[in-house]
Image: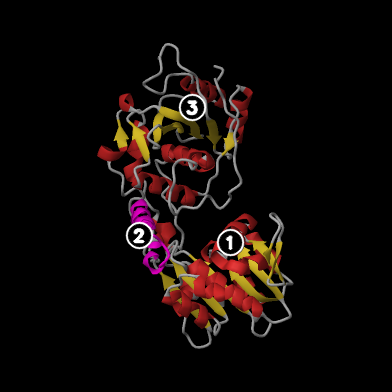
Amino acid sequence: MSVLDELPLSRKQIVSIIESRRHRVSIWAGAVRSGKTIASILAFYDAIVHAPDTGLIVVVGRTLQTIERNIIEPMQDEMVFGEWAHEVHHTRGSNTAVILGRTVHLIGASDVRAEGKLRGLTACLALVDEATLLPENFWTQLLARLSVPGARCLATTNPDNPNHYLKVNFIDRAGESGMNLGAWHFTLDDNPSLAPEYVAAIKAEFTGLFYLRNILGRWVAADGAIFDMFDPDKHVVPWSELPDMRWILGVGVDHGTTNPTHAVMIGHGSDDVLYCMDEWRYKASNAEARKTNVQLSAGLREWLNKAHHPSEDPENPEGFRGYVIADQSAADFRVQLKQDGLPTHPAKKDVLYGIRTMTALVASGRLKFSDRCPELIKEIPGYVWDTKATEKGKDEPIKLNDHGIDSARYLLTTAERKWRRQIKLNELPLSVEPEPVEPRLVKRVMS
């Protein structure tokens, strides 16, 4: 037990590890970096040692990549788990690992079809990473497959909508007769290993819904304005006063058939702030016919070849350099752009992750908007959560007047690895699909 002796565990972590031995299902829920994952991994080590000889041991997460990042790699960290780290063997990309001499199967569950992966399986032990991200049918099937006497399920999660099935059907029923379920709630302040400076920084980076969930660990509904931290006096800067740019990150494009087509250009400032520098938007008036994709492509490319920074000579602009990210559902438009010499790459469209990223950047003052983006700026105050979706246990914005926001979100999340090298967000992990995206750079667009 030398590893346990050396880890700076809180009383809540220790109690949860010990009490979890009594339960068939154990759920650690709460804030980010609150210590719940470490507690669950320690409980998992203990559970492997005492697991039945029959039945499979599984680790479940959104994808194989998130399992590797959130579970396997931390377990292999000698600085955290000492000699236990040497008992975890895994080849990246493999769907199995060997932990304490037992074969462990790694199962990704990104959509409702994943439930089929469990059929016919008999398990004795499961560790679930971010359980609220799993489809309900998968979670239910997993519990049914834990049929060996003494089988156990250990799970972690950040809070979500209070109507989420995991809270209503499981966490809220902890302690009920016959449930055999334990649940523990953690807040950021429950983690004794975090430096006070880090805690202060991360608290400043989250606001509104994400502060209540990620810092306080509360299960609260998405309600009201999404960018409730937005202040035009702080976040809008005159275009003429933009700082020098380290580079132009690129352009995000939201194509509309009946809605506006909107493009937003974002640059990485010398002050390590991201700036929405300029925008292009086309919306047909009631009196005119909509432009074709050929015409939209011509308009976008003409705009790209203009000056987008006050240091550029408007008579001889430098030409566009950066990523071109477009909604993959606009397949015909992307084909037209490619034919016209402007290759694009598909946008990552995880809406909630994109909102978390953008709100964290705005809250920390690391994303600002030039006054040459008036349509985007108009959209921000009216970008609100959909209360009807909330009633169904989902977090979704109202899809209305959001084309500029979508354009910026596409670019920020898809090209995230580029700006994340200099602009840190203390507790906002990379997207759940972390494969690097390296779109082709377009130096100058042919008009």
**Mark earlier in primary sequence (3, 1):** 1
Residues drawn in magenta? 188-213
- Gap in Å between the C-alphas at discs 3 and 2? 56 Å
**Residue matched to label 2:** 196
Q: Residue at x 41, y 49 (%)?
A: 398
The amino acid sitting under disc 1 is: Asp
- Residue that sits furthest to the bottom in the current view: 177
- Gap in Å between the C-alphas at discs 3 and 1? 57 Å
- Gap in Å between the C-alphas at discs 1 and 2? 23 Å
Q: Quadrant of residue 55?
A: bottom right
Q: Is residue 427 left or right of residue 441?
A: left
**Residue matched to label 1:** 77
Q: Is residue 324 or residue 309 the one in the foreground?
A: 309
The amino acid sitting under disc 3 is: Arg
The amino acid sitting under disc 2 is: Pro
Labelled pair 3, 2 in contact (Cβ < 8 Å): no
